[in-house]
Image (cartoon, grey):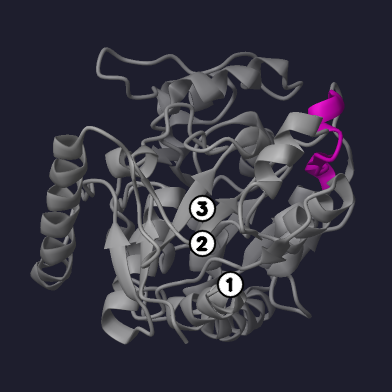
C-alpha cells in the first residue's frame, strides 16, 4: 500500500453525525493505522478525555502550520502525498452536507488539493441535475454511506461510487447494567436532530396514543439541532401543528413543542445537548428506541449506537436502515408508503404508519423477554460494525487509487 496520508476535510466533533464520523475515523487511524490521518480544521469537542486530546494535538498543530504556509504563499497548493476525503452534500457540492445547513469544512480544504480526491456523501434527496453528476464524476471516487445511496448514485450516472458504512465505538456502546434511573417507567428513546426526515412527528403522534394506554410510559429524546432552520419542514406534517420555536441562544424549545403537540409534560424529557460519550449510559436505561425515519442517506448512527447497547429498536424498513436490518436484530416497520406531499427530490422518502409503530411498542411492552432477545441480537450484529472494522473497510475501498 502506498497511501501516505489521509486528510479529513470536515470538522471533527462529538455533537453531530458528520463530526462523530470524522472524529472516530481519525482516532481509529491514529491508534490502528494503516494510514496516518491529517485534519483540515479545528475540532470542536464538548467533552474529551486527556487521551483523545493528546492524540489530536499533533494533528491540530500540523493543520495550523499547513494553513499558515499556504496563506504565506498566497495561492492554493497541491500534494501528491495526501489523499483528501471531502464531505459532500446535496448535489455533491463540497461543504454542504445534507444534514447541515451551514456545514464547516476545513479552511485548508479549499486551499489544498490531494491525490487522489475522494468524496463522501450521505444524500437524502435525488433527481440529480446533469451538473451534479458532473461534480461527482470529477472526484477519483465517491464513497456512499449506504447501499441505497450507492445504487441510486450508480443509476443516476455516477461512474465510480462504493458503499462504506459508518461504525460504532464498541468500547463505549455495548450492553451493560442499567442505572435504573427510570425503574418505575417504560422508557422510550428517540434520537436524531429534529426534522421531518427523521420522523419525530410520528414518534410524538404514536406516543400520545401509547401513553393514554400506558401512563407509566416516558418519552426521552435527544433531538437538539445545530441547524434549527431544518425543522421548518415539520409544518408540512399532518401529525403536528407547527415547528418548534428557538430561544435567544439558538436552542430549540423541544419540550414546549412536544407538549404543544400532545405529549404529556410529566412524561416527556428533552436531554438537550449531549456529547457522544454520555449516550451509552442513557441508552442502557431505555426499554425501546424508535426510529421511524422517512429517509437515511447513511445507516443512522444513533440507531446503530442504540442497537450496540442492546436496546430493542424499532426501525423503518427503508433506505439506509436496510443496511442494519438483519434477521431478528430489530423490530421492522414494514408498511412503508410514499410520503404524502413529497416532491421530485423526496419521492424516495417513505412513511411509516402510526398503527404499526404502536403494534411494535405493544409487543415490546407486553413481552420484555422477547424484546431483550431482539436487543441482544442487535448488539451482537453491531460488534461487526466497529469503527476499527469500518475504517479498515474504508481504506480497502480506496487503496487501489494509489
Range shown magenta: 342-355
Q: Is residue 95 above or below residue 64?
A: above
Horizontally, is 16 left or right of 194 in the view?
Answer: left
Q: Is residue 344 found inside the magenta-colored segment of the image?
A: yes
Horizontally, is 245 left or right of 121 in the view?
Answer: left
1 or 3: mark nearer the eye: 1
Asked if the residue under mark 1 is in contact with the one under mark 2, i.e. CB atoms within 8 Å, the reply is: yes
Residue 243 placed where, x, y %? 55, 17
Q: Which residue is mark 2?
A: 116
Q: Is residue 371 above or below residue 89?
A: below
Horizontally, is 75 left or right of 285 in the view?
Answer: left
56 or 359: which is nearer to us? 56
Q: Give the mark count.
A: 3
Asked if the residue under mark 3 is in contact with the one under mark 1, i.e. CB atoms within 8 Å, the reply is: no
Residue 6 placed where, x, y %? 38, 67
Q: Categorize mark 2 by other alpha carbons within 10 Å: few (<14), some (14-19), many (20+).
A: many
158 or 336: which is nearer to us? 158
Residue at the location (72% across, 25% down)? 239
Q: Which residue is mark 1?
A: 401
Residue 280 appears in the picture as rendered? no
CA separation, marks 2 and 3? 41 Å
Residue 265 appears in the picture as rendered? yes
Labelled disc at residue 189: 3
Amino acid at each position: 500500500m502506498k497511501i501516505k496520508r489521509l486528510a479529513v476535510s470536515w470538522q471533527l466533533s462529538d455533537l453531530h453525525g458528520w463530526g462523530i464520523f470524522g472524529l472516530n475515523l481519525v482516532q481509529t487511524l491514529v491508534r490502528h493505522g494503516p494510514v496516518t490521518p491529517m485534519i483540515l480544521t479545528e475540532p470542536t469537542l464538548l467533552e474529551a478525555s486527556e487521551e483523545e486530546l493528546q492524540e489530536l494535538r499533533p494533528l491540530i498543530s500540523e493543520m495550523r502550520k499547513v494553513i499558515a504556509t499556504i496563506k504565506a504563499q498566497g495561492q492554493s497548493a497541491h500534494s501528491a502525498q495526501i489523499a483528501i476525503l471531502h464531505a459532500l452534500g446535496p448535489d455533491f457540492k463540497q461543504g454542504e452536507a445534507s444534514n447541515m445547513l451551514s456545514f464547516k469544512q476545513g479552511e485548508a480544504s479549499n486551499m489544498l488539493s490531494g491525490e487522489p480526491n475522494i468524496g463522501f456523501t450521505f444524500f437524502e434527496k435525488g433527481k440529480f441535475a446533469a451538473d451534479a453528476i458532473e461534480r461527482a464524476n470529477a472526484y477519483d471516487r465517491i464513497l456512499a454511506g449506504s447501499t441505497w445511496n450507492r445504487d441510486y448514485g450508480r443509476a443516476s450516472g455516477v461512474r465510480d461510487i462504493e458503499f462504506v458504512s459508518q461504525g460504532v465505538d464498541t468500547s463505549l456502546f455495548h450492553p451493560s447494567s442499567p442505572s435504573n434511573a427510570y425503574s418505575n417507567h417504560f422508557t422510550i428513546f428517540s434520537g436524531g436532530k429534529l426534522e421531518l426526515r427523521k420522523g419525530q412527528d410520528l414518534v410524538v403522534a404514536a406516543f400520545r396514543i401509547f401513553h393514554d394506554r400506558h401512563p407509566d410510559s416516558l418519552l426521552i429524546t435527544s433531538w437538539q439541532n445545530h441547524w434549527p432552520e431544518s425543522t421548518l419542514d415539520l409544518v408540512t406534517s399532518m401529525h403536528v401543528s407547527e415547528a418548534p420555536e428557538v430561544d435567544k441562544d439558538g436552542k430549540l424549545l423541544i419540550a414546549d413543542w412536544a407538549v404543544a403537540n400532545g405529549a404529556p409534560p410529566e412524561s416527556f424529557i428533552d436531554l438537550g445537548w449531549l456529547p457522544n460519550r454520555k449516550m451509552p449510559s442513557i441508552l442502557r436505561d431505555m426499554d425501546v428506541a424508535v426510529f421511524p425515519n422517512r429517509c437515511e442517506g447513511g445507516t443512522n448512527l444513533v440507531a446503530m449506537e442504540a442497537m450496540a447497547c442492546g436496546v430493542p429498536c424499532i426501525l423503518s424498513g427503508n433506505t439506509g436502515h436496510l443496511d442494519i436490518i438483519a434477521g431478528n436484530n430489530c423490530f421492522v416497520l414494514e408498511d412503508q408508503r410514499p410520503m404524502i406531499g413529497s416532491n421530485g427530490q423526496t419521492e424516495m422518502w417513505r412513511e411509516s404508519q402510526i398503527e404499526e409503530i404502536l403494534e411494535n411498542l405493544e409487543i415490546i411492552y407486553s413481552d420484555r423477554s422477547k424484546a431483550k432477545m431482539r436487543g441482544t441480537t442487535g448488539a451482537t450484529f453491531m460488534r461487526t460494525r466497529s469503527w476499527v472494522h469500518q475504517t479498515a473497510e474504508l481504506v480497502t475501498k480506496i487503496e487501489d487509487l494509489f
